[in-house]
Amino acid sequence: MKKISLWSLILVFSASVALAQESATQQQIDKLTGQIQDLMDIQAQQGKRIEALERGMSELRDKLNAPVVNDYASHAELKSLVEQMDEIDRKRKEDTDNIAEQIKNLAKVAAAAPAPIKIVKNNTPKPDNDTPAVSPSASGYEYEVKQGDTLGLIAKAYRDKGVKVTRSQIIAANPKINPNVLIPGRKIFIPDPSAK
């Protein structure tokens, strides 16, 4: 009888350890998914910039191929063109640095287990410090940014809890924040589209 009790105790302990590991793995996958979504958004923005540059280059080619009475550029036109090219090059470098930084952040996240994000939809917030400051209002929630958070990760966590919100809606509801650099401790508003 003692052997059966001992075996059942070992079985229960093993099952609880396996469930805890599975939960931590799922949380890490969720965080990586959010950050991948952020990178995809940045890539889409960069694609739009490239399309605009291609249009500009096409217009310049058309101007060059158009018959002109005089085929020279003024000093002011050349100076303007140089300034535009410098601005394009500066933006390209910023985008490259931003993408490299996002990749570094992804590597750090992959190495560390993420802290769980808890969402409370009632007037009694939990006292534990891992719980975001969420206070229901007529149309959303207040959330305190934590280290390593991204807008994509926050939106996914709220979607997982039943609040159908997108990264774009969070950006629109918080026009003063930089969506690529979230400051830990800062509170942001998470709109709830279903509450309208």
Image (tube, rainbow, N blue to C red):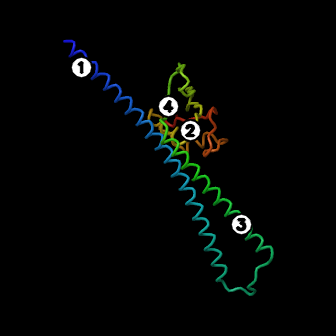
Q: CA distance from mark 3 to mark 1?
A: 74 Å
Mark drawn on residue 186: none
Give the quadrant of residue 173: top right
- Which quadrant is the N terminus positioned in? top left
Circle 2 residues within 10 Å: few <14, some 14–19, many ≥20? some
**Which residue is denoted by mark 2 in the rendering?**
148
Circle 3 residues within 10 Å: few <14, some 14–19, many ≥20? few
- Considering every residue shown, the one lying at the far right of the view is 75
Which badge, 3 or 1, is on the more N-terminal residue?
A: 1
**Near-viewer residue (27 or 189):** 27
Front of the two marks 4 and 1: 1
- Residues tagged 4 and 2 counted as in contact (Cβ below 8 A): no
Residue 48 horizontal/vertical position (percent): 57, 60
Q: CA distance from mark 2 to mark 3?
A: 35 Å
Give the quadrant of residue 169: top right
Circle 1 residues within 10 Å: few <14, some 14–19, many ≥20? few
Residue 186 horizontal/vertical position (percent): 64, 33
Q: Is residue 171 left or right of residue 115?
A: right
- Considering every residue shown, the one lying at the far front of the view is 3
**Which residue is denoted by mark 4 in the rendering?**
117
For mark 3, give the secondary structure.
Answer: helix
Front of the two marks 4 and 2: 2
Tell me if residue 80 comes above or below residue 186 in the rendering: below
Kind of residue at badge 1:
Trp
**Which residue is denoted by mark 3 in the rendering?**
84
Tell me if residue 11 comes above or below residue 42 in the rendering: above
**Which residue is denoted by mark 1 in the rendering?**
7
For mark 4, give the secondary structure.
Answer: loop
Kind of residue at badge 4:
Ile
- Residues tagged 4 and 1 counted as in contact (Cβ below 8 A): no
- Residues tagged 2 and 1 counted as in contact (Cβ below 8 A): no
Residue 123 horizontal/vertical position (percent): 54, 20
